[in-house]
Image (cartoon, rainbow, N blue to C red):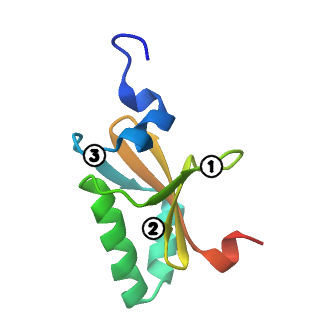
């Protein structure tokens, strides 16, 4: 990486190195908010706990996606959280049950 370049500009580096030293801001897209509202209280609590761990620098089962709307996928039980990195923020795009994702 060239000198002075932001480490967040290279998404591949971001998940390999982790976010432990960075304080990240979480943002939710409108589709993600709708997805959360449609889930049961139990599922909603589980999803939000997992996303909160990301905000504090924890790792998860994260995979970079190719040819997809979102840049990354976080696997969480039967759910998939699709997210992007924009500056110092993680933007949650969608939260979908895996049975509905892989049609």
Q: Mark 3–mark 1 contact, CB under 8 Å?
A: no
Residue topped by disc 2: 33
- Counting residues from the start of the chain, the first of labels 3 and 1 encountered is 3
Occupied quadrant, residue 88: top left
Instruction: Tell me the crowding category of disc 1: few under 14, some 14 to 19, or many 20 or more residues within 10 angstroms, Cα based.
Output: few
Camera-nearest residue between 50 and 90:
50
Q: Nearer the viewer, mark 3 or mark 2?
A: 3
Q: Residue at x 42, y 12 (%)?
A: 2
| Mark nearer the viewer, 3 or 1 | 1
What residue did someone put label 3 on?
24
Q: Which residue lies furthest to the top in this view?
A: 3
- In the drawing, what numbered circle is on residue 65? 1
Task: Tell me the CA gap for discs 1 and 2.
Answer: 21 Å
Query: Which SS class for mark 1?
Result: loop
Query: Residue 81, position in %: x, y?
Result: 50, 64
Is residue 76 left or right of 25 when viewed as pictured?
right
Q: What element carries label 2?
A: helix
């Amino acid at each position: 990486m060239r000198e002075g370049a932001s480490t967040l500009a290279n998404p591949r580096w971001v998940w390999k190195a982790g976010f432990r030293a960075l304080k990240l801001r979480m943002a939710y897209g409108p589709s993600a908010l709708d997805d959360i509202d449609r889930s049961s209280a139990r599922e909603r609590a589980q999803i939000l706990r997992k996303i909160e761990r990301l905000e504090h620098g924890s790792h998860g089962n994260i995979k970079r996606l190719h040819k997809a709307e979102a840049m990354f996928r976080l696997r969480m039980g039967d759910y998939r959280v699709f997210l992007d990195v924009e500056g110092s923020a993680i933007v949650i795009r969608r939260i979908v049950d895996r049975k509905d994702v892989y049609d």
